[in-house]
Each structure stands twice: as C-alpha cells, then as structure tokens.
Amino acid sequence: MKVTGDWLIDPATQAVCAMLSDAGYQAHFVGGCVRNALIGAPVSDLDIATDARPEKVMELAEAAGLNAIPTGIDHGTITVVSGRIPHEITTYRKDVETDGRRAVVAFADTMVEDAERRDFTMNALYCDADGLVVDPLGQGLADLEARHLRFINDPEMRIREDYLRILRYFRFHAWYGDPSEGLDPEALAAIAANLAGIETLSRERVGVELIKLLSAPAPEQSVAAMRQSGVLAMVLDGVDDRALAPLVHLEAQAGLDPDGIRRLAALGGQGDGRELRLSNAQRKHLALYRDQIGSSEGPGALGYHHGAALARDILVLRAAMLEIPLMPGAFAAVDRGAGAAFPVKSADLMDRFQGRALGDELRRLQSLWIASDFSATRDQLLGQAP
C-alpha cells in the first residue's frame, strides 16, 4: 500500500529524506501524517523516524545546508527546516522507565522497537519517501481501515507510561473512531483502573486535549464514554453532557463549524476556564456564552451587541440547553443587528444631558431603537427624549 499527497512529493521534504537515506540511514514518516494520508484527512505535522542518532542528524542537516534545531535532542528529536517546512526527525526509541508523566528513553535500532512504544495501533504506521507503507506491528492498517482505536499491546501499560493517553484515547476516538462500533471495552477497563493518574497531569495539557476532543465533528459519543468511565468528572467539576448531542445536531442544521469553546459551554460546570489554562480570549467567550444562555436578549440585540458569529453561537447554545427550537428567521435577525448602526450620537443630546444622565439616555434610546427592529430613525428617537 502507498500513500500520496503534495506534502510527500514536495522537493523540500524529499530533500530531508535524501539527507538521511543518502548517508545510509532510514527515513520513514510516522504517525499522524501517514494515518491522515491513508484516510484522506489533511496532513499538517511531518514526523520522520530514523535510526540515525540525533547528533548525526544535526551533522547531516548542516552539511546539506538545512537549518537544524535541537528542539528535543535529549529525547532524540531534531527539527530540520527545509523550504520553510519544519520536519521533526526523531531517532528510534524505546522506553526504559516511566512515571506516567514523562519517560526515560533509550535509542533503539529497529522500527519495531520504536513502534512498540507508541500509543495506538493506527499511529504506529510508517511510510518511506516513495509513500510505501510499513505496518511493523501488523495491526495498524486493519485497525485504521475499521476505524478501531486500540492501544498497542497492554492498554494498562500504555496508560501508565503516560496518563495523558487516557484523554488522547477519547480524543482520537472522536476524530478517527467508528461511532457505530463503540469504544474498545479493554481500553475502557484499563482507563477506569487508572483514573487517579489524571490528577498527576498538568492542567494545561488536560485543557489542550479537551478542547481538541470537543472540536471533533461529532464528539458526543466519546464524551458520554468519558462520563460513564469517570474521566469527565475527574477533568471538570459539575459538568453535564446531556446538551452536547442536541448542540451538535443544531450546529449542523445551522451550518456552524465545530467549536471547542462553544461545546465546553454546553457542558456547564463550575470552572471559568482557568482550571484548564484557557487563553484570555477563550475564557472571555466561555463567560459570554454562559451569561447569555439564560438572558432575554433577542437575536437582533445579540447580533448588535456581540457580532453575528457569537450571536449565532449563543442562539444554538440556548436551543440545546433550554430544549427550545431554533426559531425561523433568528439568524436573519442576527445579521440585521450586526449590520445596524445606532443613529443617535452623544452630541445630539448634550444640550439636554450631561455626565451619567447622558449615558443613561443614550442607552434608553438605544433600547427603543433595538425594540423597533432597528427601524426607528434619528428624528423619531430624539423626539422621545425628554
């Protein structure tokens, strides 16, 4: 079997492969780029596995005139930039000691050893510079074709090597698993037996994984499995995923792209995003969604005050969480509000109002204008001013 794609035949990327192979070393793409190419998904990060030691990779890159950055040299990773494309080149490795958060690794000489330390069978697929796929464990291709997400060898051992793999399991199932098949019972049992390991993870890593999971096209089955296995309660306090499936359905009806923060808001809970180390912008959106879900502002007012995109988010969240229909024409009203311009200026009222009274009167007239569906003119509004 072979993979194809512009990323593979790019001369800059082929030059990196040739840098290694011309010196007698192996160069195989591995992980996400191979997996995604096989299922027709976009390829972004380029990871290359090799039997060359990191110091040798640095030497070869410099001799080839390429920029080599020792981004993770202690773990065998060198980032080689060719044609402005970063290629993460990592020496074959095997774990010799782990504590659930970080591993002590030793360099290995074979692809099989390297494959055995990876997380899931569908991520242990390799291909050479010609696109020829290698499945060293003999399970990855079949599992990827069946969309069956499975840990490599013993699930508990894989989890104890890095407890983040618990969250990665649900995230990868949301993106690549077969929803009609359900989740692997052996994997779920191993996860349930190692829940305490989640507490050892940094909140930033947890937050990144959770937002990636919620950004999948249809994450509701994976999130439900997280709840049933006890993982969801370990990650977030007081959440309820009952509104997630209706939200995903309404998003599709409304033509909205998946959004992890919008869906996080649908889970409710006590946190404000700090516990997940969300960015300031993400926390601001999360707070706005939660504040507006129960507000009485109509579609037009939401569009005027928050812009069309956020207003649409709020309306689908309301519909999902309050179990009410998304009213026909709501998005058209949002667009009217987002494009409207309040016709009254402060200068129009300064002969009658000053200071706080001026602000209060502007807000009162603005409310009347919004209630008129943005149709009231400047003269009409000024005529209602005392």
Image: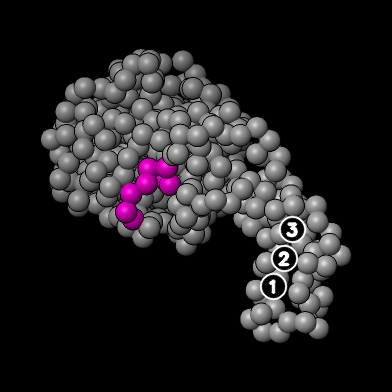
Looking at numbered disc 2 in the image, what kind of residue is underneath it? Leu
For disc 2, the neighbor class at 10 Å (few under 14, some 14 to 19, many from 20) is many
Q: Residue 139, image x and y in percent?
A: 30, 18
Main secondary structure along the magenta-highlighted residues: loop
Q: Residue 382, image x and y in percent?
A: 81, 68
Can residue 7 be seen at all in this image of the molecule? no
Label ID, residue 365: 2
Q: Can you identify the residue that label 3 sits on?
A: 369
Q: Residue 116, image x and y in percent?
A: 24, 30
Task: Give the residue at x 21% y 37%.
Answer: 230
Task: Give the residue at x 80% y 64%.
Answer: 381
Query: What residue span does the magenta drawing correspond to?
Result: 264-271
Asked whether, in this view, residue 262 is left or right of residue 345, the answer is left
Task: Kindly state the secondary structure of the residue where label 1 is placed.
Answer: helix
First-in-chain label (3 vs 1): 1
For disc 3, the neighbor class at 10 Å (few under 14, some 14 to 19, many from 20) is many
Q: Nearer the viewer, residue 323 or 385?
A: 385
Circles 1 and 2 in contact, beta carbons < 8 Å: yes
Looking at numbered disc 1 in the image, what kind of residue is underneath it? Glu
Circles 2 and 3 in contact, beta carbons < 8 Å: yes
Task: Give the residue at x 22% y 27%.
Answer: 187
Marks 1 and 2, how far apart at CA: 6 Å
Can you name the residue that lies furthest to the right here?
Answer: 379
Magenta stretch contains residue 1: no
Task: Give the residue at x 70% y 53%.
Answer: 371
Q: Can you identify the residue that label 1 sits on?
A: 361
Looking at numbered disc 3 in the image, what kind of residue is underneath it? Trp
Q: Nearer the viewer, residue 19 or 225?
A: 225
Q: How many marks?
A: 3
Q: Residue 280, image x and y in percent?
A: 47, 62
Q: Nearer the viewer, residue 36 or 3?
A: 36
